[in-house]
Image (tube, grey):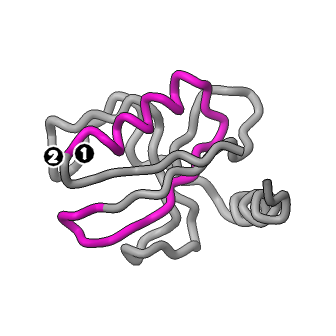
């Protein structure tokens, strides 16, 4: 795999503050039936396709480095994004993957480090 890609991701994460604006157990602001089973947030002072910060899922492993990414396509918003998975266990990775593939309108592909 491309080590330089993962090094660039690590540098991006370490250069910004992680903001968790949807903690585990919270619900989506527009879709109250949508519950977050892993902490969800973004990296402050970064930019993603939607104009906000680069999204991330933060798991419970002590090693808080990026161990996977999910590339998503959202047919309702008509956009695509990457979501960084930081310190996620195998079960948390599975949960996040299922979250992004639980609707006919959003699909995601998982790329593990």
Vertical comparison of 95 with 22: above or below = above
**Which residue: 26% across, 38% down?**
102
**The residue positioned farthest toward the front in the image shown:** 1
**Which residue: 58% across, 73% down?**
45
Task: For marks 1 and 2, give the CA distance.
Answer: 5 Å
**Quarter of image, res 90:** top right
Q: Nearer the viewer, residue 26 or 56?
A: 56
| 109 to the left or right of 29 | right
Vertical comparison of 25 with 79: above or below = above
User: Disc 2 on helix, strand or loop?
Assistant: loop
Q: Residues within 10 Å of mark 1 (few under 14, many from 20)?
A: few
Expressed as whole percent of the image width and height from the top left, the position of residue 92 reads: 51, 28
Q: Residues within 10 Å of mark 2 (few under 14, many from 20)?
A: few
Contact between marks 1 and 2 (CB within 8 A): the answer is yes
Task: Tell whether position 100 is magenta.
Answer: yes
**Residue underneath mark 1:** 28
Task: Tell whether position 79 is magenta.
Answer: yes
Per the rendering, the mark at residue 31 is 2
**The residue positioned farthest toward the top in the image shown:** 91
**Which residue: 43% across, 29% down?**
95
| 104 to the left or right of 49 | left
Per the rendering, the mark at residue 37 is none
User: Disc 1 on helix, strand or loop?
Assistant: loop
Expressed as whole percent of the image width and height from the top left, the position of residue 77 reads: 23, 68
| 75 to the left or right of 15 | left
| 9 to the left or right of 85 | right
**Which residue: 21% across, 44% down?**
103
Vertical comparison of 1 with 37: above or below = below
Expressed as whole percent of the image width and height from the top left, the position of residue 56 reads: 52, 51
Q: Considering the image in quadrants, where does the N terminus appear? A: bottom right
Instruction: Give the magenta part as a residue range.
Output: 74-103
């Amino acid at each position: 795999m491309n080590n330089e890609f993962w090094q660039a991701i690590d540098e991006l994460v370490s250069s910004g503050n992680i903001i968790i604006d949807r903690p585990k157990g919270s619900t989506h602001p527009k879709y109250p039936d949508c519950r977050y089973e892993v902490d969800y947030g973004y990296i402050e002072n970064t930019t993603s396709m939607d104009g906000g910060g680069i999204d991330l899922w933060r798991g419970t492993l002590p090693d808080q480095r990026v161990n996977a990414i999910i590339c998503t396509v959202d047919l309702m918003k008509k956009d695509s994004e990457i979501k960084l998975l930081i310190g996620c266990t195998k079960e948390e990775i599975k949960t996040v993957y299922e979250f992004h593939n639980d609707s006919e309108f959003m699909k995601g592909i998982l790329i593990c480090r």
